[in-house]
Amino acid sequence: EDKVVQSPLSLVVHEGDTVTLNCSYEVTNFRSLLWYKQEKKAPTFLFMLTSSGIEKKSGRLSSILDKKELSSILNITATQTGDSAIYLCAVEAIGGTYKYIFGTGTRLKVLA
Amino acid sequence: NAGVTQTPKFRVLKTGQSMTLLCAQDMNHEYMYWYRQDPGMGLRLIHYSVGEGTTAKGEVPDGYNVSRLKKQNFLLGLESAAPSQTSVYFCASLNPGLQETQYFGPGTRLLVL
């Protein structure tokens, strides 16, 4: 059965801390893994990782794909209160179908 | 360019009532999706469409029907609402072969009493 598991489920840190969020997956014919940030409403896209693009970085956020371990991490350095959100990981269930399985998400709270 | 919009934003239904949620996108995307999000469950795919006139089942299709009569619209119907369908519903669209990331609507909060 295809599945995506995120850990931890929730996390509370203080501003300036560095956090690492984890996503592991079991899917048929992996093609892409996506990270989203969800604040109050719709998820917004952060990164897409594929076999040809296993590392992405944008400002204080970065993500790495480990195809051998079937997992990915999302790092946030120098966290700010604006980083408080649910972070979702999604994996394409069967490569080329554009059907995605989402993990349950990690709820991050950054305290001032 | 409004992106993905959803109507209504919030609705309360009684058990057994029916309703239709509307999703519209103005990006000319081929693929459209309906998800539900429940606490601790992440996003689960209900139905999706790979083009005008086509629909397919996702992970949790029971109790829902969909239609894609126009490319820009994707309708989600509940024929006989049940309390288990209380959830937040998100629509998304995607253009395969380009950015290949889903664009989400703002969500519809549905409460079934």
Image: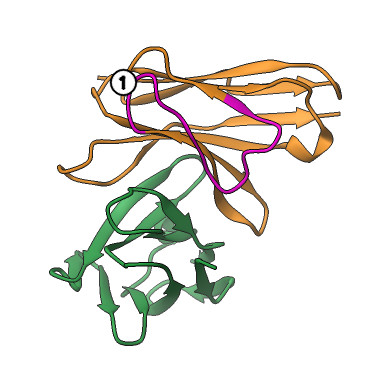
A53 vs A41, left or right, is left
View extreme (bottom): residue: A68
Q: Which residue is mark 1?
A: B2
Q: Residue at x 28, y 80 (%)?
A: A67
Magenta stretch secondary structure, dominant:
loop
- Residue B9 drawn at (x, y percent): 58, 23
- Residue B26 drawn at (x, y percent): 28, 19
Residue B42, relative to residue B55: is it above or below?
Answer: below
What colour denotes chain B?
orange
Q: Secondary structure at mark 1?
A: loop
Q: Residue at x 18, y 68 (%)?
A: A56
Query: Chain for mark 1?
Result: B
Span colored in magenta: B50-65
Q: Residue at x 19, y 71 (%)?
A: A51
- In this view of the protein, which residue sits in the foreground, A83 or B98? B98
| Quarter of the picture holding the C terminus of chain B | top right
- In this view of the protein, which residue sits in the foreground, A110 or A8? A8
- Residue A83 drawn at (x, y percent): 41, 60
- Residue B63 belongs to magenta span: yes
Residue A32, relative to residue B90: is it above or below?
Answer: below
Task: Please tell me in which quadrant of the rendered image residue A18 appears.
Answer: bottom left
Residue A75, relative to residue B6: is it above or below?
Answer: below
